[in-house]
Image (cartoon, grey):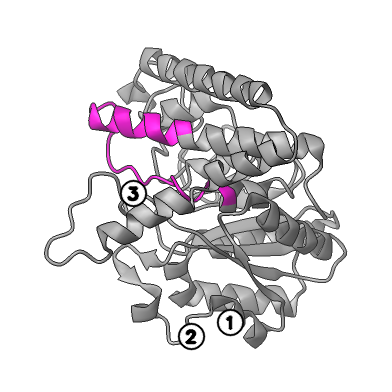
Amino acid sequence: MQLNGGQRLEAYRRMLRIRRFEEEGMRQFKGDKIPGWFHSSVGQEAAVVGACLALRGDDAMTGTHRSHGHPIGKGANLDGLMAELMGKAGGICKGRGGSMHVADSSVGIVSESGIVGGGIPLATGCAFSAKVRGVDQVTLCFFGDGAVNQGTFHESLNMASLWKLPVIYHCENNGYAMTTSVAQSHGQTDIALRAAGYGMPGITVDGQDVSVVYEAAALAVARARAGDGPTLIVANTYRFDEHNFGMVVPGQPYRSVEEVEAHIRDRDPILLYRTVLLEEGINEKSLGAIEDEVAEAVDRAVQFALASPMPRTETLPDYMFSSLLAGQYSSVAGVKRN
């Protein structure tokens, strides 16, 4: 399964949307327009977009603390996403999710989590729901290399394999869990080999090559839809920025300037794919049109977010729970809504 003509340009568009959105987000964060933390996914665009392009619109997805790019990879509108990062009422979560806890039902984003590995059991639950409902939806679960040492990873993979759940576990292995390298924290550094312990395929791909990521994800999705169960994909990628934007690491640097510069120079997934498209006969004019379109979309998103109001304090309790008994006491929350 390979990217077709239309998908190839869409892959470039979505990767560029992530890159420009993240770059603008860092500028807004630096200008105190975005509160909290900002975890950039610059450098990891191909690992995200390649996997997302293998999904249908009604498929589900979970993400991580670094998940501004994941909704964009599945086609999300940028306006509400930028407003959400700014904590505005016009955000996709009404300003309540912020940078690390985005949910967007319009593109199937069930949840993103600031807890390392927090999305893994949620994705497993989504896949279980699809199986119980008898539908062929699949769930794509993003997480980083640090999460594979969490108990939820092992429990979820075991359950998914045992019940043949339609879920794809997609590890964005950027080599570092904050500042700790895979070599320092993993007894088995080949993460894909862990899949064998749970009776599922484990695949390692070049996470800087969007076409290769797509091919692996498309096969995993087809397998899941056919009822053959989960797959673990490990996309070896690299984050160009620090764990979070502006983070200062005291003491000895955990990675050298030369290492980072080499990845930026030689392994930028967008530049690599742009070269491929040109070699395949896509002209500069077509790519330039996409680049202009993306720049305009990001600018609109910033203007929308800046103009959006802050949530009113009296709305603070809104959306905290959903009662099945309108006007009655909720058996879950024990709170009566007027």
Structural distance between the alpha carbons of marks 2 and 1: 8 Å
Residue 149 lies, in percent from the top left, at 44, 76
Badge number at residue 194: 1
Q: Is residue 116 above or below residue 53?
A: below
Question: In percent of the image, x 66 and y 44: which residue is there?
Answer: 276
Q: Secondary structure at mark 3?
A: loop
Badge number at residue 269: none
* In this rendering, position of residue 118 left or right of residue 205: left
Which span is picked out in magenta?
20-46
Q: Check disc 3 and report the residue beneath it.
A: 241
Q: Is residue 97 above or below residue 180?
A: above
Label 2 with label 1: CB-CB less than 8 Å:
yes
Q: Of callouts 2 and 3, which one flags the residue occurring earlier in the amino acid sequence?
A: 2
Structural distance between the alpha carbons of marks 1 and 3: 28 Å
Question: Which one is closest to the eye, mark 1 or mark 3?
Answer: 3
How packed mark 3 is, by other alpha carbons closer than 10 Å (few <14, some 14-19, many 20 or more), is some
Q: Of callouts 2 and 1, which one flags the residue occurring earlier in the amino acid sequence?
A: 2
Q: Check disc 2 and report the residue beneath it.
A: 188
How packed mark 1 is, by other alpha carbons closer than 10 Å (few <14, some 14-19, many 20 or more), is some
Label 1 with label 3: CB-CB less than 8 Å:
no
Question: In percent of the image, x 36 and y 66: which residue is there?
Answer: 177
